[in-house]
Image: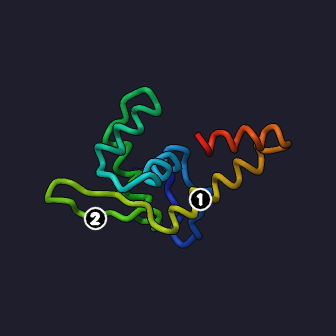
Amino acid sequence: MSEAQAVPGTQQTAHDLTAFQHNILVILAEEPMYGLAIKRELESYYGTEVNHGRLYPNLDDLVERGLVEKSELDKRTNQYELTADGYETVLGQLNWVFSKLVTDEDRAEDVRALIEA
């Protein structure tokens, strides 16, 4: 069972996603990856082990929501890729975060510096 279960028949939005699911989308924004590569990226970010029982149900949920596309690399390995809707979800989250964070020109400059780095 994934961390965020949608109620059948309701519109699914980015607001329904967990932070873990948002982090998966951000990782996939860089490039398509197979499951174990996503797992390693998450473990690097969290500084702790991410078990398969947490990762794959969340990936499946993101696939069901149309935010991630799953394809077969070989008989044992699936690749995951951000869809256009997934990309828009990441942009929407960044837009919301920046709208709260950037309250003056000094903060705007801090964000510009991060983007240029």
Residue located at (42% from left, 38% from top): 42
Among numbered discs 2 and 1, the one appearing first in the sequence: 1
Mark 2 and mark 1: Cα distance apart in space: 23 Å
Q: Position of residue 16 (x, y in %)?
A: 58, 56
Q: Nearer the viewer, mark 2 or mark 1?
A: 2
Look at the numbered disc 2 and give the secondary structure of its residue.
strand
Q: Quadrant of residue 113?
A: top right
Q: Amino acid at mark 2?
A: Ser
Q: Position of residue 62 (x, y in %)?
A: 44, 59
Q: Name the quadrant of the C terminus.
A: top right
Dot 1: within a 10 Å radius of its alpha carbon, few (fewer than 14), some, or many (20 or more) residues? some
Query: Which of the labelled discs sits on residue 71, or is there none?
Result: 2
Between 34 and 18, the one lying in front of the other is: 34
Between 68 and 95, the one lying in front of the other is: 95
Residue located at (63% from left, 54% from top): 93
Query: Which of the labelled discs sits on residue 14, or is there none?
Result: 1
Name, please, the residue furthest toward the top: 47
Q: Quadrant of residue 19?
A: top right
Q: Is residue 103 left or right of residue 12?
A: right
Residue located at (33% from left, 42% from top): 53
